[in-house]
Image (spheres, grey):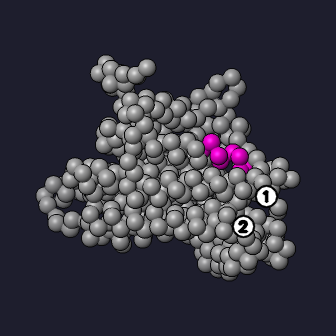
Amino acid sequence: MKIYIHRLYKYFNIDIIFLILGITITMPILTISMSGRQISVFYVIFILSMIILFFDFFNSKFNFKLNKNSALFLVWLLLSLLSSLFGIMYFNSKVIWVNKIVSYIPKIIAYSLVLIFIASSKNKKNIIKLFLKGFLIGIIINIIWAFADGLIYYIFNFSISNEIFSDYMKNIATTRKGVSIIKGGTIRVGGLNYDPAHLGGLIPIIIGYSIIKKKHILLFLSIGSLIFSQSTTALVSSLIIIIINLKFVNYKINIKSIVKSTFILLGIMILLISSLYMNLNFLGIFSNNYKAFINRVTKVYINQFTTNTRFLYHRYIPNSLYFNNFKVLTGTGFGTASYPYVYNDKIRSIMELRQFPYDPESTYISYLFDTGILGFMIYILVLIRLFYYYYKYKVNIILLLSIESIILSGLFYHYTITAYQVFILIIASIYISVSSEKSEKLT
C-alpha cells in the first residue's frame, strides 16, 4: 500500500522536525523524564525524523543514488559493522568488551539508514538546509548557555547547568558530580553537553563563522565560552581554523560595521562601569578563568608534554600496532581501541592503565584500532575529499567549518561516532550532488 507522505507535507510542515533535529543534536543533556528514566530529546526527534525519512524512502520505491563521497562513507559505516562482529567473536569471553561493542551497533545501523534515506529523498535539499540552520542555532544556544553558566558561577557561586541537569548526571555512569567541572575556585563549563571537551568541537565552528560573517557579539560570546570551558581542543582548533580561512574574510571597512563595533564597545564599557557600582569585577572573572586555562595548558600540555597521556597514546602507536597483530586489519569495533594499550604489559606499566574497553583521547587512534587500517584509510579519505571540495568551492560555510573542526578536534579528543559529526559528514557527502546539480549555494 502506498503511503502518501506528500499529504502530510501538504497539511503539516513536517520538515520542521529536521530543524529541531539540527538544534537538539548539539545538546544531548536536554532530556525528558519518562518512567524514572531520562530520555534525550534528540533521541525522540531522531526517531520522528527517521519515520518521515522511511516513508519518503518507501514512496521513492527504494531508489537511491550515492556519489563517491557518500558511497565511501557508507562503506566505512558497513566496515565498522563488520569490525564490530569480529570484535564480538574475538572478545566472546570478555563480557564488558562485548557489551561495549554491541552498544554501538544500533548507532551504526541507524546512521547507515540515515545516509540511504536522505540520499533517496526528493526533498533532500530542504532537509539539509533546515538541519544546518538548526545546527547553527544549536551551537549558538550552547555558546550562550556556556557563557551564562560561567558568568553566573562567578557572580552567584553556583552553576546553572549543575543545578538544572543534576538528574541527568545521576543517570549516567560518571564520577563527576555535575555537567560543569568546578575546581580550585574556577569552572569548566560544558554548555548543553555532558563534557566540556565536547565544546571543543563546537566552539571552533562558531568562532570561524562569527569572524567570516562579522558577527561581533557572537565572537565575544564565543571567546568567553572558550575561556570558561578551558578547552585546549577548542583553542588550538579555533586558531588553526581562523588562519586557514582568512581568505574568506572581507577586510573592507564600511560605515555599518564601524557603527556596530562602536555600539558593542560602548556596551562593554557600560557593563564594566556598572559592575564597579555592583561590586562585580567582570575583568577579574575572566582573568581567573583565563589564568586557570593558561595554567592547565602550560602544566599539562607543555611542561609535562612527554608524560601527557595524549602524547603517550600517540607515541606508542607503532608498539600497539605490532601488539594487535592481525586485528590491525580487521579492527575490533567502536570503543575497544584501548585493547592494544591496556593488554600490552610494557605500555600498561608505563601509563598505569586499567584493563577495560574505551577509546583513547584521539579520534584517529580510536578509529585506527576500532575499524582497522582499511576503515581508518577510508575515513581519512572521506575527510580529505570533503575538505577539498568545500574549501575550494565554498559551497557552504557551515559545512566547511564543521568539517575543519571534525578534522582538527579529532587530533585531541575521541569523538567516537558522535552524532553531530556523523550527521555533518553524511550531509556534506550528499550535498555535493545537490549543489552540483542545482548550482546553488546554501547560506
Residue depicted at x 58% and y 63%: 375
Is any atom of residue 396 visible in this view?
yes
Magenta stretch? 100-107
Q: Is residue 44 part of the magenta span, yes or no?
A: no
Decide whether the magenta segment is chiefly helix, strand or loop: helix
* Secondary structure at numbered mark 2: helix
- Residue 274, horizontal then vertical, whole percent: 39, 48
Q: In the figure, is residue 195 to the left or right of 322? A: left
Q: Which mark is residue 90?
A: 1
**In the image, what residue type sits under mark 2?**
Lys
- Residue 408, horizontal then vertical, whole percent: 49, 67
Is any atom of residue 277 visible in this view?
no
Residue that numbered label 2 is attached to: 327
Residue depicted at x 55% and y 53%: 77
**In the image, what residue type sits under mark 1?**
Tyr
* Secondary structure at numbered mark 1: helix
Q: In the figure, is residue 105 to the left or right of 236? A: right
> How crowded is the residue under tag 2: few (<14 C-alpha within 10 Å), some, or many (20+)?
many
Q: Is residue 53 above or below residue 218?
A: above
Q: In the depicted view, which residue is nearer to us: 108 or 392?
A: 108
Q: Is residue 290 above or below residue 136?
A: below
Q: Is residue 388 above or below residue 76?
A: below
